[in-house]
Structures are given as structure tokens and as C-alpha cells.
Image (tube, rainbow, N blue to C red):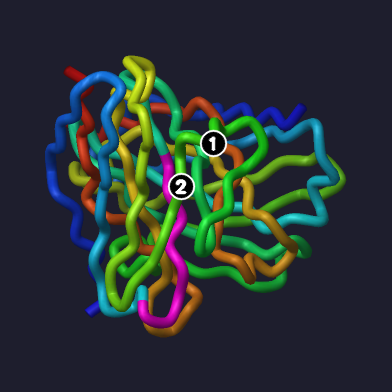
């Protein structure tokens, strides 16, 4: 299957650590990318590969992959991290992109 | 600074056509593959199409294959999406999105435009 599965909602207390996961068979072959989308805004690229942050992304964001599951971890979540988070990878053929359904992160 | 500006969205009847444009600046447009990604109201992101830097190779989601055509004019730094036989379920914000290399080998998207809304309704 080319699907990527994410938990629809996750919450975290301010300053605590949260892990957002993404599960899919093709993650055994292709790394995931992660995007943050705040309400009414375009997505922003926040993580790629095993654990690579694009320029400008705070170092409280980290990534990892184990087997068929990719994870985005926010260590010391801030109020401004409240957003929808999407994972993305590729299908078995490698040429089509696939997005997860998204995880809405609430910072309490 | 990378900037992507979409235009061409609007209201169209089912079965109609629309052409979206995306004007790029801040990078060497011809050196990068480009994508269209859409988001239906209240829903998640969905990949639509990708075109390599030279425009010679294109890929489409099954849901739009045969109806949509992606193209680019590197002399004008502009990406296009021709949408024909539009359906109600094509209603979405359409984002223009830059890949990280010429052939889209990495599969990542590093910059997104602000999007243009396409509404298909009678």
C-alpha cells in the first residue's frame, strides 16, 4: 500500500515533548518529509531525510525513522508550534508523492 | 528569497476548464522540478502533479490523469496547470510548490506558494 497513516489529533503541554508519527510500507524504502501548516497559511517544510532540518527551522524539531514508521519530535513545544503536521513520501514506483492525512497538534 | 505566486483560480461549472499559473522568483527556475498540490476545504494535502526542470517528464495523480496537464515556460519562470473536465471534487486550494532538484530525485518540497482557490460548482 502507498498510504501514510497519521493520528488525527495530538496534544502536548507547553514546554513538553511530543512525537508525531507516520506509518506506511513505503517508509521502509523512502524517507519521509514533514510539513507544518498553520491555520489559513501555506505549508512550511520542517524536516526531511533521517533527521535534517531546513534552514530556519528551530532545533527543537527532530526526525527519525524506524521500520515502517517515521516520527517528528518537538522537544519543548511552544505555543507557535500549534498547527497541522503532514508527512509525505513516495509511492512504490517512486515517482508519485503521497501525503499522510495530517495530525492536528494542540499545545495546552 | 524564493517567491511563488499562483493565479487563475475561480468559480467554474462542472465539466468546465481552467488554467492556473504560478510565477516564480528568487531562484533559477529551470534548475528545479515543480509540483502542484491541492487541499480541499477542511481536508488534507493531496499531490496533483510534478514536472522536471526541463519540462520533458511529467507525473500525475490517478485522480487527475487524462484531465489535467502540467507544463512550464522556463523563459517566463512560470508553471501552469491546465484543468479540463472539472468535477465538484476538484474544488480545492491549489498550491504551486518547488522541488529540491531538477529531477525531483529527493521527493521533497521546500517552498510553497500561498495557493489559489478553485471552486467547481453549478
Image quadrant where one finds the N terminus of chain B: top right
Q: Residue at x 62, y 62 (%)?
A: B51
Q: Residues within 10 Å of mark 1 (few under 14, many from 20)?
A: few
Residue at 43% in and 82% down: A29
Q: In the picture, residue A100 is in which quadrant? A: bottom left
In the rendered view, tell whether residue B78 sits above or below residue A66: above
User: Is B69 located above or below residue B26 in the figure?
Assistant: below
Discs 1, 2: same chain = yes
Q: Nearer the viewer, residue B99 or B37?
A: B99
Instruction: Specify start and end residues of the magenta stretch as a single range.
Output: A28-35
Residue A27 is left or right of residue B82, and the answer is left
How far is disc 1 from disc 2 in space, using C-alphas?
A: 7 Å
Q: Position of residue A78 (x, y in %)?
A: 36, 20
- The image quarter in which residue B75 lies: top right
Q: Chain of mark 2?
A: A
Check residue B43 for magenta coloring. no
Do labels 1 and 2 touch, CB within 8 Å?
yes
- A80 or A89: which is nearer to us? A80
**Quadrant where the C terminus of chain B is found in the figure:** top left
Residue tagged by mark 2?
A: A62
Front-most of B47 and B81?
B47
| Residue with the mark numbered 1 | A59
Task: Please give left or right for residue B19 compared with residue A64 in the image.
Answer: right
* B86 lies left or right of A65: left
Q: Position of residue B63 (x, y in %)?
A: 29, 63
> What's the mark number on residue A42?
none
Amino acid at each position: 500500500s502507498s498510504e501514510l497513516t497519521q493520528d488525527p489529533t495530538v496534544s502536548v503541554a507547553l514546554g513538553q515533548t511530543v512525537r508525531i508519527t507516520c506509518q506506511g510500507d513505503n517508509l521502509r524504502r523512502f524517507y519521509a518529509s514533514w510539513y507544518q501548516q498553520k491555520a489559513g497559511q501555506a505549508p512550511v517544510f520542517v524536516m526531511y531525510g533521517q533527521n535534517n532540518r531546513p534552514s530556519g527551522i528551530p532545533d527543537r524539531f527532530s526526525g527519525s525513522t524506524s521500520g515502517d514508521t517515521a516520527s517528528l519530535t518537538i522537544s519543548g513545544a511552544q505555543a507557535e508550534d500549534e498547527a497541522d503536521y503532514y508527512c509525505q513520501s513516495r509511492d512504490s514506483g517512486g515517482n508519485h508523492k503521497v501525503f499522510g492525512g495530517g495530525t492536528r497538534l494542540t499545545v495546552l | 528569497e524564493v517567491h511563488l505566486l499562483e493565479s487563475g483560480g475561480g468559480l467554474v461549472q462542472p465539466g468546465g476548464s481552467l488554467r492556473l499559473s504560478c510565477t516564480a522568483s528568487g531562484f533559477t527556475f529551470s534548475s528545479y522540478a515543480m509540483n502542484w498540490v491541492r487541499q480541499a476545504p477542511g481536508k488534507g494535502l493531496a499531490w496533483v502533479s510534478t514536472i522536471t526542470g526541463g519540462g520533458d517528464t511529467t507525473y500525475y495523480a490517478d485522480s487527475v490523469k487524462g484531465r489535467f496537464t502540467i507544463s512550464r515556460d522556463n523563459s517566463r519562470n512560470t508553471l501552469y496547470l491546465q484543468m479540463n473536465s472539472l468535477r465538484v471534487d476538484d474544488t480545492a486550494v491549489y498550491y504551486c510548490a518547488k522541488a529540491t532538484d531538477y529531477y525531483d530525485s529527493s521527493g521533497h518540497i521546500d517552498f510553497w506558494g500561498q495557493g489559489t482557490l478553485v471552486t467547481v460548482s453549478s
